[in-house]
Image (cartoon, grey):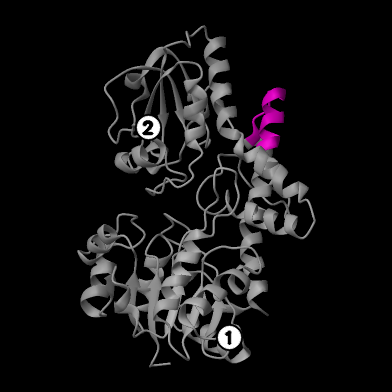
Amino acid sequence: MQDIKIAVIGLGYVGLPLARLFSTKYTTVGYDMNKARVEALMAGHDSTLEVSDELLQDAINNHGFVCTSNLEEIRKCNFYVVAVPTPVDRNNTPDLSPLYGASEAVGKVISKGDIVVYESTVYPGVTEDECLPVVERVSGLEFNVDFFAGYSPERINPGDKVHTVEKIKKITSGSTPEVAEIIDRVYDSVLTAGTHRAASIKVAEAAKVIENSQRDINIAFVNELSKIFTLMGIDTNDVLEAAGTKWNFIKMNPGLVGGHCISVDPYYLAQCAQRMGYNPEIILAGRRMNDGMGAYVADQTIKLMLKKGIQVLGSKIIIMGFTFKENCPDVRNTRVIDIYRALQEYNADITVFDPWASPERVKHEYGIDIVNELPHDRYAAAIVAVAHRQFREMEIDFNQLLEPNHVIYDVKAIMPRELVDGRL
């Protein structure tokens, strides 16, 4: 195990924490095509905030961790880990192009006897049927003869400083029993939570894709309950609290479902099922429900404003929070954008305030302007869309922020009930 030299391809939310962890035990090189990203990391700062400056600088200075955008610098490695994004396109069709690109990169540098492990979320069969043929074609090597493979799905939870990479149990798998053993030992050697060795690569792929699909469906159920109970004049959170007293009740909270995993992975599973001739009704119904919650929040806010006699046309509305989850700068696939776009249809004057998100990145990805500092203005309505600690701790003076006659809609149910007019 001492001769293992690891290359992690893709230094985003998944790849960087894993590469940093591997570097504590093995010679590790991180590769990313984004030169600016590499330069920032080598300067000791991770803009995603997943790895602290202290840990990153320790890895670079004391463990020899290196980040590079030069493919040749990973040629001497023998254990390649692919951790690139697996998004969907505008039609919610899985986009495997980042995986194809990473597989080509591996194919250019891999040697006989080497191992490549994929971490990107996919549907069963992608690793062996889509990715490895690319490695074979580019390298001229034969899979399971000249090189070997495995799959170990990522379980990174962005912004979570408790369930960090080393504290989350990892699924591993390999293309042969012997390789599965090696892969499992490499991962287990850096994890405190241990590993679970799956029966095959396809089993490991399937396990990952259903983790987030299950959560998506459960959230869709409580989102539907929230709509029903709102019509009944019942507080959904009171209902969930009461029901949660039963020992086997699975408590979930209603909300927006965005990000790179929960709102994306079900489409991978759905496409796989459709290829096999089966139409996955529950999975897609859950997706439709969750994808419609942003527009629902906007509509509920407008209704509350009208009930209070507040002029909607041209009114100032502030959306508090834009990231897909609290206390992290990740704006990938945030559904807060759906609230914004729905409010635009009412010709409202919308301000988006988020102390965590990068205005430049939001402008690049969504084409809208946001602010990191609370504006000196007064608003007719506020929508608390993300449960950032700044909002939970009530660091904002709503008496100064809002007009005397106003509406507050609390998506995450984090504010005192007496202050809000509506919530999921």
Q: Which residue is mark 2?
A: 368
Indicate the secondary structure of the residue bearing disc 2. loop
Q: Which residues are magenta?
A: 223-236
**Viewer can see residue 291:** yes
Q: Is residue 5 magenta?
A: no
Give the residue type at disc 2: Ile
Residue 176: where, in percent of width, then height?
A: 62, 88
For the point 50% across and 64% down, the residue is: 99
Q: Residue at x 35, y 82 (%)?
A: 75
> Which label is found at residue 180?
1
Q: Which of pointers 1 and 2 lies earlier in the amino acid sequence?
A: 1
Quarter assignment of residue 36: bottom left
**Label 2 Cα crowd, 10 Å radius (few <14 / some 14-19 / many 20+):** some
Element assignment for label 1: helix
Q: At 64% from the left edge and 30% from the top edge, which residue is drawn? A: 235
Amino acid carrying label 1: it is: Ala
Q: Position of residue 86 (x, y in %)?
A: 52, 58
Residues at marks 1 and 2 touching, judged by CB atoms closer than 8 Å = no
Mark-to-mark CA distance, 1 and 2: 47 Å
Say whether residue 230 is magenta. yes
Quadrant where the N terminus lies? bottom left
x and y percentages locating residue 269 in the rendered image: 67, 57
The one nearer the camera, 275 or 325, is 275
Q: Counting other residues with Cα less than 10 Å from the Cα at mark 1, is it few (<14), some (14-19), or many (20 or more)?
A: many
Q: Is residue 299 left or right of residue 55?
A: right
